[in-house]
Image (cartoon, grey):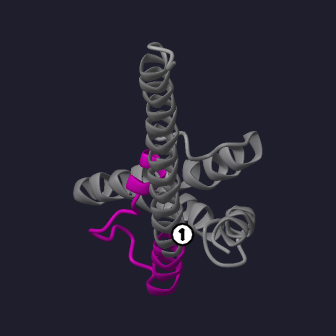
Amino acid sequence: MSDPWIGVYGTLAGAIVGAILGFVLTELARRLERNRERGRIWSALRAEVEHCAADAQGFLDWNIMAPLWRLPQDAYRQAVNASALSTTGEASAFATFYSPVDQLNRGLDRVAEAADRGGARANDEHGRNRLKAGRLIHGGEHYAEVDRILNARLV
C-alpha cells in the first residue's frame, strides 16, 4: 500500500530545492554583475588617471597659464560612490592622487580670474599649479602608487 503523503513530501522537497536553487542562481548573477561593474570602474579609473597625467604633462610642456580644459574626476567619484576602492591603501592612494587634481583645477580657475583682472597674482598661482601638475605626471610622486594599484587590479 502506498503512503498518501509521498506526493506531498515530493512536492515540498521540490519546492524547497527550487527555492534554494533560485536564490543561489540569483545571488550568483548579482555577484557576477557587481564584479563586471567594478571591472568597468577600474578600467575607467585607469583611463582617467592616464588622461590626468597627460594633461598635467601638457600643462607643464606648453606653459599655458590658464588652459580652457580641466582634469577629469568623474571615474574617481564613481569609484568612491560604488565603494570600488575596497582597501584603506587604495582609498588613500587615490585620494592622494585626486586631491592635487582638484587643487589644480581650482588653481586654473584662479589663474584665469586673476589674468582677467591683470594682476601679478596670476604668475604666483601659475607657479603653484606647475608644482601640483608635476606630482601628477608619469614619474610624479602621486602617480606611481595609483599606477601600481591599477596594474594589480587590471591583470
Q: Is residue 72 magenta?
A: yes
Q: Which residues are magenta?
A: 51-78
Whole-percent x, y for residue 139 in the image:
72, 77
Q: Residue at x 56, y 46 (%)?
A: 84
The magenta stretch spans residue 109: no
Q: Residue furthest left?
A: 116
| Relative depth, front residue between 124 and 33 | 33
| Residue 114 versus residue 57 in the image, above or below | above
- Please give the residue where the numbered disc 1 appears in the rendered image: 46
Amino acid carrying mark 1 in the image: Arg
Q: Is residue 17 above or below residue 99?
A: above
Residue 30 placed where, x, y %?
Answer: 45, 44
**Disc 1: CA contacts within 10 A as few (<14), some (14-19) or many (>=20):** many
**For the point 53% across and 80% down, which residue is it?**
57
Residue under the point 41% across and 63% down: 71
Dominant SS in magenta:
helix
Observer-nearest residue: 132 or 117?
Answer: 132
Residue furthest front in the image: 1
Q: In the image shown, does 71 or 133 lie closer to the viewer?
A: 71
* Picture quadrant of residue 91: top right
Left or right: 114 with respect to 81?
Answer: left
- The picture places residue 134, in percent across and down from the top left corner, at 63, 70
